[in-house]
Image: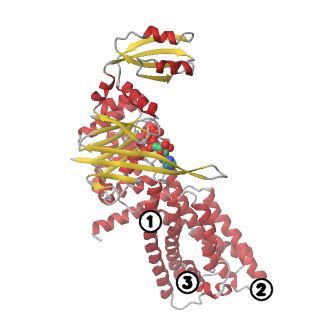
Amino acid sequence: MKMANFRSTFRILRNSVILQMKSNVISSDFISTLFIQPVIFTIISVGTYLYGNKPDFGLFAITGTGLIAIWNNNLFTSGEIIRGERRTGTLSLIMATPSSLLLILLGKSFANAITSVFAMGITFLTGMLAFHLPIGISNPLAFLIGLILIIVSITCLGLVFGSLFILTRNAGEFVSVANFPVYILSGLSIPLTLLPLWTRPLSQFLTPTWGNIILNEAASGSGGNMLPNYLVIVGLSIIYLVIARILYKRVEYLALRAGTLEQW
Amino acid sequence: MTIIFTENLRRTYQTITGIIRRKKKEIVALDGVDLSIQSGELFGLLGPNGAGKTTITRILATVLLPTSGTAQVFGLDIVKGVKQIRPRIGLVFGGERGLYWRLSGRDNLQYFADLYKVPPEVAKRRIPELLEMVGLTDRANERIEGYSRGMKQRLHIARGLIHDPELLFLDEPTIGLDPLAARDLREVIRGLNQAGKTIFLTSHYMFEIDALCNRVAIMNKGKILVMDTPSALKKVVANLEVVEIECFGIPEELILKLRAHPSVQAVNIERLEHSQLVQIQAPAGAELVKEFLGILEGVQVRKVVTRQPTLEDAYVKLVGEESKKV
Ligand SMILES: Nc1ncnc2c1ncn2[C@@H]1O[C@H](COP(=O)(O)OP(=O)(O)OP(=O)(O)O)[C@@H](O)[C@H]1O
Ligand SMILES: [Mg+2]
């Protein structure tokens, strides 16, 4: 890649982030996925573990719930971004530019993902206030690096699902259903050890699985070297982007053929 | 040089009708369109609602695929050459959609400059120039939300020009503008053409096309009926005159009677606020006014005028003839 190309790519990415930040007002969706859901989910899942006499799982329940919130927020906002582009009539206009739609959406999705860091904070707070769980993060730096990598990675995974929204305005129903397997398979709502063995390879392919491991280890201080896990997340992100690129090419073609870019 | 070329271009849409018994229906939006547009032209495409104007514009602007047939822009196939075509064309749809409402006018232009990979130093110079050209310099830092319709439409034009395209597609750019704003916008369009840009314009308004375009195609129901210079098209109605009768509450059967009159070439009804304007095309000098008024016996008539035909009448005649065939 030439330097000028690189700069232009960076500019598109950065300005898409900024544009999305500017356009985002506090919508009711935003409040629901980032504040209300995390609180309720944390109470349910931490409560379940506590009453099941498994207090060790308290921390696990909290990071898991936080990741669910981040994942949910990402998935729905990436759909919402594309729906918004349809509504404003800009989807076909940005498609008509020489910039890659995937790159534009990556920037916009990432902007939303950053805001979802709140959700993680909220779940920790809920855990501490509602259940008096003694939660300290023993390795804050490892936790923070992990959190950033996970957010980037979840953004990439969200884009894979988001491709469907380009194809049809009705992608929402499908995505809400497809959403559950992801967090069950990633062990966010119940521990992975409770899942049948054959699901293991699927779990390993999902970035939230690794994210949950990293956050837990960093918070409890139980982990040794974090680098391998970080690398897995980076590797998975690259794989998601490659898949997304292939999908977007196909989906853009199908949308141009069906003439659905302007339907909202 | 040929900039736009299409041959036997077809486009159909699938729609689903009915809720319980779902039936697939195929709508033919373009039914074999042949076009050839040269560099430097200001080409006008005219047609009633649903004629297929937006469909063909979108196909040529690479945001919709044809069902079959050939379409080339700059001699490149619109599917295979899409990467080379996109940086060289600008696309402007009329209406209020197509802008980021929460951003200022300037930020909208800046964002599209990035997406079109305009080098920052060029964008820095061009954005103020474009804002000046469309008269939005003073309001450039306000959010689009607060813009009037005409302001949004002008910003659209600036957005479509941000990468200095050679070819500009304008789909009903003056729709919904007041007459003065529309006239200003037409001046801008004319200026762009004089500055060397090829322009593909669609419109409902004959006078707009007449005033601006060097060549016109009239289309209806997915087909091009005629394609020529505005003055040549007016020849279709050259030996006719138009009798305009303004009346109140004309019954359908009388309109049919007028249409059936052997000398009548075309009849168009325009609905005014409280009355109807019946426009009858008949051979010049045939002195048929009395006969027409005879047919309209019993209808309250307010005014009768005989006038020279315009391009609009040519359009009425051509589109009318086409509808009669079906
Ligand atoms: N996405 C779509 N799905 C189904 N039918 C469509 C779609 N877009 C256009 N059509 C149909 O195709 C035909 C041509 O539409 P088009 O929008 O090209 O007409 P137009 O000449 O631009 O009309 P107008 O003057 O109203 O803008 C119409 O019958 C329209 O209903
Ligand atoms: Mg149209």
Tell me if B107 is positioned left or right of B42 in this view.
Answer: right
Tell me if B237 is positioned left or right of A148 in this view.
Answer: left
> Vertical placement of A142 versus B271: above or below?
below
- Chain bearing mark 2: A
Q: Residue at x 56, y 55 (%)?
A: A25
Q: Nearer the viewer, mark 3 or mark 2?
A: 3
- Chain bearing mark 1: A
Say whether mark 1 and mark 2 are on the same chain: yes
Q: Regarding mark 1 in the picture, which secondary structure is present there?
A: helix
x, y percentage for residue B34? 32, 44
Answer yes or no: is residue A8 visible: yes
x, y percentage for residue B271? 51, 23
Query: Disc 2 designates what residue?
Result: A53
In this view, the residue in front, A79 or B139, is A79
Query: Disc 1 designates what residue?
Result: A250
x, y percentage for residue B116? 34, 56
Residue density around tag 3, few if under 14, some if 14–19, many if 20 or more, within 10 Å:
some
Residue density around tag 2, few if under 14, some if 14–19, many if 20 or more, within 10 Å:
few
Answer yes or no: is residue B143 visible: no
In 3D space, how far apart are the residues under numbered discs 1 and 3 (Cα atoms)? 26 Å
Tell me if B90 is positioned left or right of A240 in this view.
Answer: left
Find out whether the residues at labels 1 and 3 contact each other: C-beta distance under 8 Å: no
In 3D space, how far apart are the residues under numbered discs 2 and 1 (Cα atoms)? 50 Å
- Chain bearing mark 3: A
What amino acid type is highlighted by mark number 1?
Arg
* Colouring used for the render: secondary structure
Q: Quadrant of residue B289?
A: top left
Q: Regarding mark 3 in the picture, which secondary structure is present there?
A: helix
